[in-house]
Amino acid sequence: MGLFNKLNTPNKLTLCRMIGVIFIVIIGVIDFYFKKQLTIYNSNNVSFTWTRIIILVLFLGCSYTDHLDGKIARKNNQITTFGKFADPIADKSLNNSLFIILAVNHELTLLVPLIFVLRDTIVDGIRIIAAQKNKVLAASFFGKLKTVIQVVLAAYYLICYPLFNAVLVLKVIGIILCVIAIITSLGSGIEYLKNNKDMLLEGAK
């Protein structure tokens, strides 16, 4: 509690989001192993569990703190080194953890979270190199769009996947959202590489 009290409001929100990721993973594991026992509705190929609803609420709440902490930090000039370090980690951990859970449950192909994690790893590597050169890489519009689409995709699958077998159009929309998320993820990663190629190739020639 001592560390928590020393943090400003945006950093507290970021830390809460990181703690939320841990709870989402734990509840996701519980859902995987005890799905039958936790089912609250099961009829005509449609099945919902208590844990799925809890994960959805936690995910949406944590996603909102991502918007809120940045807004408060900019408004009150409370941008800190901790925030610069922890905020992107919390964001990527939140989305990627949930996509891995969906993949483990065979609701998404494993290729989707692998692409997201690969993109994030490359971008984080670029950011580390930039930090060593005292350069700050601001999030691009493409990168922010990628995050928004991933949040929409994750929420959509949490809500609609149990209905995919019963309503074909929902499944088609889910596939389209997956494709859009993959394109924006790869596109934003390529954008980072392109915009920082001179820095990355420095000394290589």
Image (cartoon, rainbow, N blue to C red):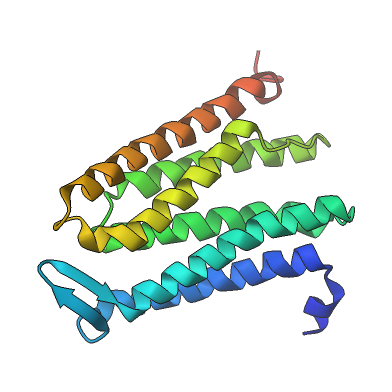
Q: How many marks?
A: 0
Q: Is residue 2 left or right of residue 70?
A: right
Q: Residue furthest right?
A: 77
Is residue 37 shown above or below 117? below
Instruction: Residue 46 in the image: state x and y as whole percent.
Output: 17, 68
Instruction: Residue 17 in the image: state x and y as whole percent.
Output: 62, 67
Q: Residue drawn 12% across and 66% down? A: 45
- Image quadrant where residue 166 sits: bottom left
Q: Is residue 20 left or right of residue 135?
A: left
- Image quadrant where residue 36 sits: bottom left
Q: Residue drawn 33% across and 56% down? A: 157
Work out whether residue 198 or residue 25 is closer to the camera in this orientation and state it. Answer: 25
Q: Is residue 8 left or right of residue 192?
A: right
Q: Residue drawn 57% across and 25% down? A: 191
Q: Residue furthest top?
A: 205
Work out whether residue 163 or residue 21 is closer to the camera in this orientation and state it. Answer: 163
- Image quadrant where residue 15 sits: bottom right
Is residue 153 shown above or below 132? below
Instruction: Residue 164 in the image: state x and y as whole percent.
Output: 20, 55
Q: Residue drawn 80% across and 68% down? A: 9
